[in-house]
Image: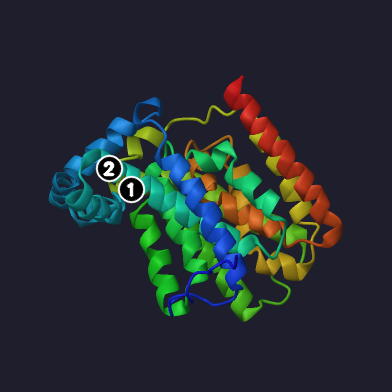
Amino acid sequence: MAIVYPVSQPSFLKNNASKNVIFICVLISLFYAIILTLLPMDVFQDRDNYLNYANSSRIILERNLNDGFLPYLTNEPVWLYLNVLISSIFGGENTVRFIIFFSSFLVSYSFLRIGYSKTSLFILILVLLMPQVLKNHTTHLRQGVAVAIFIFAFLVNNRFKYLLLFMTPFIHASFFFLLPIYIFSELIKKYKFSGFILSPREVMLLYIIFTFLLTFLFPYIIQFSGARQAEQYVNVLPDGSGLGFLIWSVFFFLFILQSSNWIRNEFYSLFSVGFYLSTYFTLAVTARVFESAFLFVFLSMFSTRKDYRLLFIVLCMILFISQWFLLLK
């Protein structure tokens, strides 16, 4: 019996994949999203908080606006408006389930579509099943929505792409860090600053200067902004085990061994890893910011030279096993 494939994509989507690929990506993503959506509500941390968003976002928006325009902007207004809109249709608990389905489907579909030509489907699914990815659809739901929109933006035409990208900081504050990095990386690719980042030494110097300044200025920036995360992250030191630092140091070392063209084209991912490593012991927000760039870092791995690709696949499997081991022990 012949398989009936989905109809052609909407005009705002880039048509750079066969119908077979689109069908497989949709099928896997539906399964992924449905399973996550149907998980019990009461076994995951912070669900009461998200139910509160579903029921009270309009009140929170009014309170933030009364505090001033800057606190209104820095306290994720798009996330709150999404809750107002969705809850007007579905109600409390179903709003949370809809958000889980939406973000997990969009992340899975976009990641598979972008990565299908770079590595095997098995490896892509393995990445989607890592705890660091899954918790954006079980615990950190707000971040999951922002990541979903950010990665989906790379499948749409330019007239919609930048609108979606610029929405993300107003859904999750981690993109106030990552969006400037992305814009800077695009400028490097567009204007090809010859001699600017052609060596690993220059790349390392650049991110060390940036992260040093950011670490120094961070407490002042976040307190001035009026963001609700100020008390959570200012004057609080990270409590990581150091395992993440060791593993990602290996990844970073392998990244800077790549060609100059690769460094220029994948600067967003490279700089995201550099930011994570250089602020690992100084900023409590570092791990959460890096989670938002996590999937793009993996896509960059699969664009490296063929003689490195197998090594990266092995490292991905080690990371997958270590994350689940630490979670389940």
Disc number for residue 98? 1
Disc number for residue 94? 2
Q: How many marks?
A: 2
Q: Which secondary structure, mark 1?
A: helix
Image quarter of the N terminus = bottom right
Determine the image quadrant of residue 325.
top right
Q: Is residue 147 visible?
A: no
Q: Amino acid at mark 1?
A: Phe
Q: Amino acid at mark 2?
A: Asn
Residue 329 vertical placement versus 268 (above, below): above
Image quarter of the C terminus = top right
Taking the spot 40% from the left edge, 48% from the top edge, the residue there is 101
Graded by Cα atoms within 10 Å as few (under 14), some (14 to 19) or many (20 or more), the crowding at tag 1 reads some
Taking the spot 72% from the left edge, 58% from the top edge, the residue there is 119
Q: Is residue 53 visible?
A: yes
| Mark 2 vs mark 1, CA separation in Å | 6 Å
Residue furthest top as drawn: 329
Measured as percent of width and height from the top left, residue 59 is found at 13, 45
2 and 1 marks in contact (CB < 8 Å): yes
Taking the spot 58% from the left edge, 29% from the top edge, the residue there is 240
Residue 138 vertical placement versus 207 (above, below): above
Q: Is residue 310 left or right of residue 60?
A: right
Determine the image quadrant of residue 320.
top right
Measured as percent of width and height from the top left, residue 194 is found at 71, 77
